[in-house]
Structure formats: C-alpha cells, structure tokens
Image (cartoon, rainbow, N blue to C red):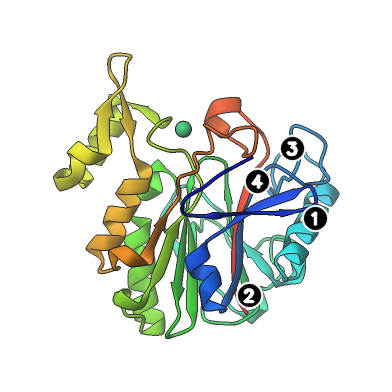
C-alpha cells in the first residue's frame, strides 16, 4: 500500500491513518492524519470527517468515533476548527471540548488552533490543503493549522509559532513541527497570478518553490517547502521539521483529493496532549 520515508502508515482493520514518528517518540501526544479508508460513510465519502457536505451527520459522528478511539482519544475531546483559508488562530481549552463533533461548532473563520490543556484534541479538516503540526515538548503545548495556498502565502505557520511564543512562552528551537500529507510539488499546478503571490512573499526561495509547468502560463508550486522555509525563518531547527512525502493527489485512492478526483469527503488532522 502506502509507503513513506518520513511518516508512519498505521492500519487498524480497514482503518488506515498516518502518524509522525518524531511526535510519537515524545509520548506526549495522540495524533494522526486520516485517509479515506475505514469509515462508515458510503462511497465516495468513506472515512469522511467534514461536517458540511451531503454525507449524513450520523455517519460523520461515527467516523469521528472510529478515529478517536483508534488513537486512544474520545469524540468528546475533539475541537474542530471552522476554516476559511485565512490565518486567524484561536486558543482553546477544556470548555471547548466536543465542539464540532458532539456539540455544535461555535467558532467561525479559524484556521489555526492552539492549546496547553491535556485531552483537548485539536482538529483541522483537509482535502489537499497542508496540515501543520506543532509540539512544544518543554512547555507542553500544541498547535495545528490548515494551510492551503492562501494560508501558506499568509504564513500561518509563522503566526502559529509567534502565538505559541506569546501564549505559552515557547522557544522555537524547542518546537517539533510536521508538514502532513497534502498536495505535493508534483501535482499543485497554479496560474500566473498565484505563482506571482508566492514569488513576492518567498522572494529568496522562489527558484526552489516555483517551476514552470508543461502548459504555458502554468506553474508548479511546492507548498511543503514553502511551509518548511517559513518554519526555518521563525527559528525552528531543520532536524525538528518532518516533511511529508505523501501527495494526496498522487495517492487519491487512499486520500480524499479535491483537485484530482473532486472527492467530496474530507480528512482530519488531529493533535491532542495526553
Ligand atoms: Zn502528486
């Protein structure tokens, strides 16, 4: 099936999800990035964790149960962000547990979540967009962000690190971070307008991040490297950054891919302090 040099592919019966070895080693967190496999929803939804869409809410709730129990958590621990491809970050706590899963979602327009409370499971929703994971093992604090191309250009990764510094006293040199499964430089094709935005924001790295596509006026952009560069520029150590080698569009049989298959299902990144 799936093979990765940087991430671990976990299988539990028909359920399949991805974990980050550097995060696992700390023993401080439960976490995963889900695939489209192992859910109760009818195809093409499968393991669907998106709350909007035509899939029955009862199916989505049962899918959350499955993945939460598989990683040793509970649906009532989870807090689901309300993403709009922005860069707003919200600090959540024990009173937010269950919002978006067993209780209605309350927050709006939030693409990043942080907490220093245990058993508050941060959740972001994805179908090609990049999940960014943050763990401060010293201060025992975590963050999770949804970075599509807009969030990447808006440097939500940098904003997350600054918020963790302000709120938890995190030292960027302590942070473990990960760039999870999402659309890779092999498949993320954009027009000139988007390529230009990357060029203006990532001036010094533009040669590494942007390359012309076969069709004229189109470019491939490397969202993984762009987010890695953002983390490095904030003081995260290169050896503390895990970068996915799994492209959700290349592996659209395993992942929901908005671009490749127009899959209506959504995957979740989950991160929770034990
Ligand atoms: Zn690809």
In 3D space, how far apart are the residues under numbered discs 1 and 2 (Cα atoms)? 17 Å
> Which-is-in-front pick, marks 3 and 1?
3
* Residue found 75% across the figure and 63% down from its top: 70
Among numbered discs 3 and 1, the one appearing first in the sequence: 3
Residue for badge 4? 35
Residues tagged 3 and 1 counted as in contact (Cβ below 8 A)? no
Q: Where is residue 120 in the image (x, y as percent from the top left)?
A: 63, 75
Disc 1 CB within 8 Å of nearest ligand 1 atom:
no
Residue for badge 2? 120
Look at the numbered disc 3 and give the secondary structure of its residue.
loop
* Residue found 35% across the figure and 79% down from its top: 166
Vertical order, 97 against 154 (above or below): below
Which residue lies most toward the left here?
204
Among numbered discs 1 and 2, the one appearing first in the sequence: 1
Look at the numbered disc 4 and give the secondary structure of its residue.
loop
Nearest to the observer: residue 122 or residue 51: 122
In 3D space, how far apart are the residues under numbered discs 3 and 2 (Cα atoms)? 26 Å
Along the horizontal axis of the image, is 116 left or right of 237? right
Res. 45 mark: 3
Residue for badge 1? 61
């Amino acid at each position: 099936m799936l093979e990765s040099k940087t991430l671990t592919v976990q299988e539990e019966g028909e359920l399949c999800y991805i974990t980050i070895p550097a995060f696992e080693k700390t023993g401080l967190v439960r976490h995963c990035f889900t695939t489209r496999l192992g859910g109760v929803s009818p195809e093409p939804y499968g393991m669907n964790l998106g709350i909007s869409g035509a899939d029955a809410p009862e199916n989505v709730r049962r899918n959350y149960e499955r993945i939460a129990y598989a990683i040793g958590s509970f649906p009532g621990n989870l807090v689901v962000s309300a993403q709009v491809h922005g860069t707003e970050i919200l600090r959540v706590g024990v009173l937010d547990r269950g919002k978006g899963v067993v209780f209605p979602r309350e927050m709006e327009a939030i693409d990043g979540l942080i907490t220093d409370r245990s058993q508050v499971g941060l959740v972001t929703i994805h179908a090609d967009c990049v999940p960014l994971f943050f763990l401060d093992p010293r201060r025992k604090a975590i963050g999770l962000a949804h970075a599509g191309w807009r969030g990447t250009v808006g440097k939500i990764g940098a904003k997350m690190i600054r918020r963790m510094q302000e709120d938890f006293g995190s030292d960027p040199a302590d942070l473990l971070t990960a760039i999870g499964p999402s659309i890779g430089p092999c498949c993320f094709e954009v027009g000139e307008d988007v390529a230009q935005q990357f060029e203006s924001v990532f001036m010094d790295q533009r040669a590494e991040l942007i390359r012309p596509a076969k069709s004229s006026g189109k470019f491939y952009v490397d969202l993984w490297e762009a987010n890695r560069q953002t983390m490095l520029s904030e003081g995260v150590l290169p050896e503390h950054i895990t970068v996915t080698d799994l492209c959700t569009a290349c592996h659209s049989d395993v992942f929901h891919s908005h671009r490749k298959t127009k899959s209506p299902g959504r995957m979740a990144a989950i991160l929770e302090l034990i």
